[in-house]
Amino acid sequence: ETGVTQTPRHLVMGMTNKKSLKCEQHLGHNAMYWYKQSAKKPLELMFVYSLEERVENNSVPSRFSPECPNSSHLFLHLHTLQPEDSALYLCASSQDPFPEQFFGPGTRLTVL
Amino acid sequence: DAKTTQPNSMESNEEEPVHLPCNHSTISGTDYIHWYRQLPSQGPEYVIHGLTSNVNNRMASLAIAEDRKSSTLILHRATLRDAAVYYCILRDRSQGNLIFGKGTKLSVKP
């Protein structure tokens, strides 16, 4: 595997389910990000991890819970989501201080 | 964060050059100009970035106005695979966050 991978690629869940999105980067980077892309809206930054510590949380509801167990893996734990949370969730990584972010293909989430 | 303005959409013919404009009149001295693109059903992809001087890489060229209030991404020979949404983003050199706008949707006709 190369670059940034995300699993699953597609997920359908009910509002009472608990699920997790997984991101793995094979680039040796030290920063990882979660973004949300809703239909017809710009990408929104959700969380930033640098050296495995969360350094930014952009007022994201607590039903989204990130976890970064090591510099290569990032999770987004989901529980009691709402239909408006349906979106493409994108993971990215970068190597400070270089600015380029490398994105994964995203997980398409549908909440019923 | 300083704001950028891009046209919603542009069309190009295959194998012709494409000039994608971006206005950023409130740019600060420490803002870098970044371009990313997002192909259909994929995550965004880094294209190029610059500060003051024009930049070239294997994907594109970035022309930056002398007053830095605008820039142009140049694709020298558009291919069908260049059809994507192109985002112009200002990023302060001291922080890593990218603030995406709506971008320009580029269509390439054969």
Image (cartoon, coloured by chain):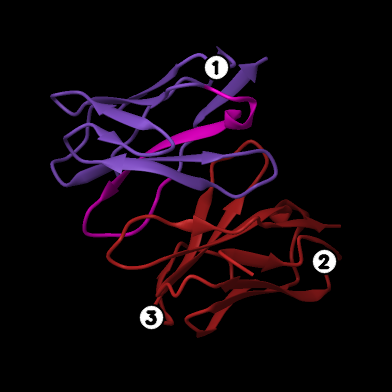
Chain colours: A red, B purple
In the rendered image, residues at marks 3 and 2 fall on the same chain = yes
Q: Secondary structure at mark 1?
A: loop
Residue under numbered circle 2? A15
Amino acid identity at mark 1: Glu
Is B93 magenta? The answer is: yes
Query: How far across and down, in percent of the image, does residue A4 sit?
Result: 58, 65
Rounded to the nearest angstrom, the CA distance separating label 3 from label 2 is: 33 Å
Mark whose residue sits in front, 1 or 3? 1
Residue at image x 30%, y 61%?
A98
**Which quadrant is the C terminus of chain A positioned in?**
bottom right
Mark sitting on residue A74? none
In the rendered image, residues at marks 1 and 3 fall on the same chain = no
B79 w.r.t. A9: above or below? above
Q: Residues within 10 Å of mark 3 (few under 14, many from 20)?
A: some
Residue at image x 82%, y 66%?
A15
Mark whose residue sits in front, 3 or 2? 3
Q: Is residue B37 left or right of residue A109?
A: left
Residue at image x 49%, y 33%?
B86
- Tell me the magenta residue range: B78-99
Is A28 magenta? The answer is: no
Residue under numbered circle 3? A51
**Which quadrant is the N terminus of chain A positioned in?**
bottom right
Rounded to the nearest angstrom, the CA distance separating label 1 from label 3 is: 43 Å
Mark found first going from the N terminus, 3 or 2: 2
Q: Is residue B62 left or right of residue B53?
A: right
**Cβ atoms at labels 2 and 1 below 8 Å apart:** no
In the rendered image, residues at marks 2 and 1 fall on the same chain = no
Q: Secondary structure at mark 3?
A: loop
Please indicate, yes or no, whether residue B46 appears anywhere in the rendered image. Answer: yes
Amino acid identity at mark 2: Met
Rounded to the nearest angstrom, the CA distance separating label 2 from label 1 is: 48 Å
| Of B39 and B104, the residue lying toward us | B39
